[in-house]
Amino acid sequence: MKSADTAPPPGLRERKKQRTRDALLRSALELFTEQGYEQTTVDDIAETAEVSQRTFFRYFASKEEAAFFVSRLAESHFVEAVRHRPRGEAPLDALRQALVESWETIGEAVEQLIPLELHMRFYRVIESTPALLAAHLRRATELEEEIARVVADREGLDMDADPRPRVVVAVFGAVMRVTERIWSARDDATLTALRDLTTAYLDQVEPALTGNWRSDTPGPDGRIEARTT
Amino acid sequence: MKSADTAPPPGLRERKKQRTRDALLRSALELFTEQGYEQTTVDDIAETAEVSQRTFFRYFASKEEAAFFVSRLAESHFVEAVRHRPRGEAPLDALRQALVESWETIGEAVEQLIPLELHMRFYRVIESTPALLAAHLRRATELEEEIARVVADREGLDMDADPRPRVVVAVFGAVMRVTERIWSARDDATLTALRDLTTAYLDQVEPALTGNWRSDTPGPDGRIEARTT
DNA sequence: AGGCTAATGACAGTCACTGACAGTTGACAA
DNA sequence: TTGTCAACTGTCAGTGACTGTCATTAGCCT
């Protein structure tokens, strides 16, 4: 809390580093979305950012880390939001609310680094690149583990004795992944579009697990709309 | 169905290929479990199997593919089991039953290629190797997509219009992954141990999603309840 | 037996990543 | 202001996963 608040004016050295990291990040994401992840070599990125390849690896442990740097930022915002939800709330509701409310702050935070639109477009690259998708999923489960801990805390449970925190979070994560996939396959790669899709799907989780399906069908027009809600 | 039943006696060439593939597979898994995945180079594997590195890559597209070759086989058995479940069954029940009943045939099928115990031990390598875990998760979601299609078929639903098939399968997959993790962290890497753990957890899915937690404790079944530790 | 072709090995090259070493350049005290 | 120190950086060499190419070997079939 010290270094963040009492910000001693960052020296020239620090600013330079910041600029380099930023240039690398922007170069990487631009090249990834333009010509694809696999088609972009680290040398390309370094060259575009006007540094040596070795310097790239001093800022990012791997090509992959650069790719997910912004996502990591976004995720940390979400986790914070979950932490600040009132304790009374049911777990799944808390997650849902945290999602809705953190969406804005995430948008702002991303813009600090790169154009939001670039970040959004990059999601499609993730979905269509096996190596990136794999990394994305691994990161997602790591995140779920962290969130499960938060949930377990909220409810005063011991995660190792009671599987329920992990299960709910896993369900939540599963819905997120399904919506991500569907969303990225569509045209409008908007932040709000993703949000609406996600909340709509979340509403269907419980009913989807219980009742038998053939009796109550979803909306007649085929879209997702209102069954019970 | 033709080539499988009316097996024309496989020529020498074919048998040789089979032996090579088998040697590579066994060498790979043994080395992976003995000295770790990252610590094992493809050259090591090829040398142990007494072929050139280039030949390894003619049998397996990547080091990773060799690692998951047996898993792929096991998964296909499970999918078949799901396909043959009676249509009346509720989706989650069908998945659960398919799991229980395919477990045996999977064991047999694996033994055709490598010692079952080796396969089981390899799961711990997966969980403890980031690169393998990532690949495992990606493969898991691909599998989920396939199963979701089967489920949607069973229920006569259109997967693109109705999200419920994907959601249930995702829930199922989430439970599997959670149990895999817990199981692999334990001592007894038995097939039956994994099966019991999985079914026990599956039983808790619905209750975990609904009720409020603090009032009702988890299952009276001895295993998971503990709570205190 | 001899030709066809699948299977293999040997070799060179690309790309992600790492360690080692030397040169530059901010930071900071004298 | 200057000199020293430590942080950054570039260059170079090396490893390991993978790919393309080409020549050789060895089942297969007539």
Image (spheres, coloured by chain):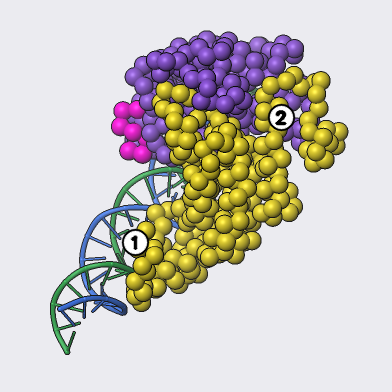
Chain colours: A purple, B yellow, C green, D blue
* Chain that bears disc 1: B
Look at the picture and state if B228 lies above or below B59: above
Q: Badge 2: how crowded within 10 Å, few (<14), some, or many (20+)?
A: many
Look at the picture and state if B45 lies above or below B94: below
Marks 1 and 2, how far apart at CA: 48 Å
Q: Nearer the viewer, residue B40 or B212?
A: B212
The x, y position of residue A169, in whole percent, is 64, 27
A36 magenta-colored: yes
User: Quick one: SS at disc 2?
Assistant: helix
Q: Is residue A147 left or right of residue D3?
A: right
Q: Are marks 1 and 2 in contact (CB under 8 Å)?
A: no
Q: Residue at x 61, y 21 (%)?
A: A206
Q: Badge 1: how crowded within 10 Å, few (<14), some, or many (20+)?
A: few
Residue B133 visible, this angle: yes
Q: Which mark is residue A116?
A: none
Q: Nearer the viewer, residue B145 or B149?
A: B149
Q: Residue at x 67, y 37 (%)?
A: B202
The x, y position of residue A61, in whole percent, is 51, 37
Q: Which mark is residue A164?
A: 2
Q: Residue at x 64, y 56 (%)?
A: B121
| Mark 1, residue position | B2
Q: Residue at x 74, y 14 (%)?
A: A87
A120 magenta-colored: no
User: Quick one: SS at disc 1?
Assistant: helix
Q: Quadrant of the N terminus of chain B?
A: bottom left
> From which residue to which does the magenta span run?
A33-39
Residue A139 visible, this angle: no
Q: Amino acid at mark 2?
A: Arg
